[in-house]
Amino acid sequence: MTETNELRIAVIGAGPAGVYSSDIFLRQLKKLGEELGLGTAARIDLFEKLPVPFGLVRYGVAPDHPSIKFIASALEKTLDNPDIHLYCDVEFGKDVTLDELLERYDAVLFATGAVEDKPLGLPGADLDGVYGAAKFVEWYDGYPTGAREWPLEAEEVAVIGGGNVAMDVARELMRNADDLRERTDIPDNVYEGIKENKARVLHLFIRRGVAQAKFSVQELREMEKLPGVQLIINEDDFDLDEDTIEEAGKDKLTRQMVEELFTIREMAEDMEDDGDVDYEGNTADRKYYVHFNSAPVEVLGEDGKVVGIRVEKTETSADGKMSRTGEFEEYPVQAVYHAIGYKPATAPGIAYDERHAHLANANGDGRITVAAKAGSDGADAAVEVRERLYATGWAKRGPVGLIGSTKSDALLIVTNMLEDLSKAAEGGRVAADRDPESIDRLLESRGVKPIDFAGWKKIDAFERAEGAKEGREHKKVIDPEQMRALAHA
């Protein structure tokens, strides 16, 4: 048995939150380790249940986001670090338990992300033709255990949501299949599915007003350049009062979003004036309606299938408070997609805060607790912290925030981890089993064959070679068995 004196950290989840936290931990340890009495050496083992890394970046964001390539490239550079060991195709709670990790690691950090939709909670939500965004995203992103086919028979569809995922879903439903394949890494089944998509009219319903939407400017700009699609807006939605304009101006990102939405309003007017055309002036064969201050209240059905959606007009004050008007309108649709938020994953043996939808942690500092906070008012309550266990990203804060929030989260949690480790006996080296090969023997004894960084590089090389055959940079492999065969070849 080989014992080492390096700190040993297990990270659960190899998406952005897990990879950033691993990188920041090593950087902060080199910077502060001697001062804290921890030394500067650490080994981080990064466990991922899927056969490949990158989580949300690979499987949660629409394939036509150009910036995603750069994020994936940065994450890959981080993983190419001798102090970070990748263990893909290893599922926490199934292939390895919490007790087994605590025996071998000085601290365990959960960065498990989210894969489930929040329930729609409207009458008619169980009708055939109502879909959660998460499952649709899994389909078009080629998630290893996701659907391989998707029903795209509806000619009129509704998308519910005022955030970036709703925009992604709406855009993919309005996409031209050839344009999408040319620009992205979509697999063949997604190309064939979108090619047969019958959607010609799409309604995007946003409960609050123009100034309260949660779209990024990038999302809006991608919405503006959809071949064959005419954007249609209600000009009344853009009649903002002075208080709302003043409030929106206080935040730079909100101000930029509102300015971009006004650009879209002008584009929509031009598209109509020029004879129902797309952004290039070509005849549009699809119509994309954007409805602000519109709260769906019921999905309408016949014979168990979606036939329409009932929407109530709302009013939104400058401070973002929404009120109902009692004015209703019905729209004929045959499919409804809801993108109203994700529910971060649970973790076996870890308490879950159902109210806030994340792993139970102390006052948002990332330290895992034995239970969620008491009290429905959200007031701080004394809850016992579980030593050596931490959460970051959506697992810590719930399904809000983008990559920037994930990075700041990681720095906060790493700071807390280093502080706790410095106070522990033996300079934070508290795991009983310090043999770095112990985890490999344990997994091997169970017939678990992890995919390491070199294995991932084989999968990536194959995807690039397949893409090159079609003049594309990349083409996703979606079958987990094929991924395993490639990685272990």
Image: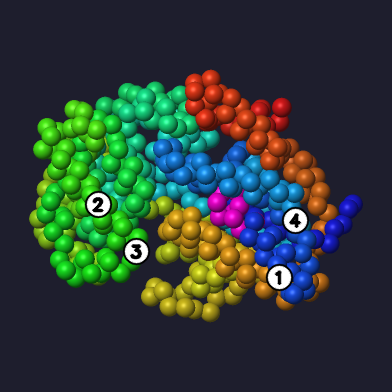
Answer with the quarter of the image where residue 189 lies: top left
Which secondary structure, mark 2? helix
Task: Measuring from the top left, give residue 171's x and y in whole percent.
Answer: 32, 39
Going by the numbered disc 1, the residue's amino acid type is Leu
Q: How far separated are the C-alphas under marks 4 and 3?
A: 40 Å
- Answer with the quarter of the image where residue 282 lies: top left
Tell me which numbered mark, 4 or 1, is placed earlier along the sequence.
Answer: 1
User: Which one is earlier in the sequence, the residue at label 3 or at label 1?
Assistant: 1
What residue appears at the point 52 percent right and 30 percent down from the top-left corner?
A: 473
If you read the primary sequence from the N terminus, does the residue marked by circle 2 or circle 3 appear first? Answer: 3
Count of marks overlaid on the render: 4
Point 83% across, 54% down: residue? 435
Q: How are the residues colored?
A: rainbow
Residue positioned most to the top: 469
The CA span between labels 2 and 3 is 14 Å
Asked whether disc 4 touches disc 2, contact meaning CB atoms under 8 Å apart, the reply is no
Mark positioned earlier in the residue sequence (4 or 3): 4
Whole-percent x, y for residue 71 in the image = 53, 47
Q: What span is colored magenta in the figure? A: 14-22
* Residue contact between numbered discs 4 and 1, judged by CB atoms under 8 Å: no
Say which amino acid is labelled 4. Answer: Arg
Q: Does residue 473 belong to the magenta stretch?
A: no
The label number, if any, that marks residue 32 in the structure image: 1
Which residue does the numbered mark 3 point to in the structure image? 252
Magenta region, main secondary structure? helix
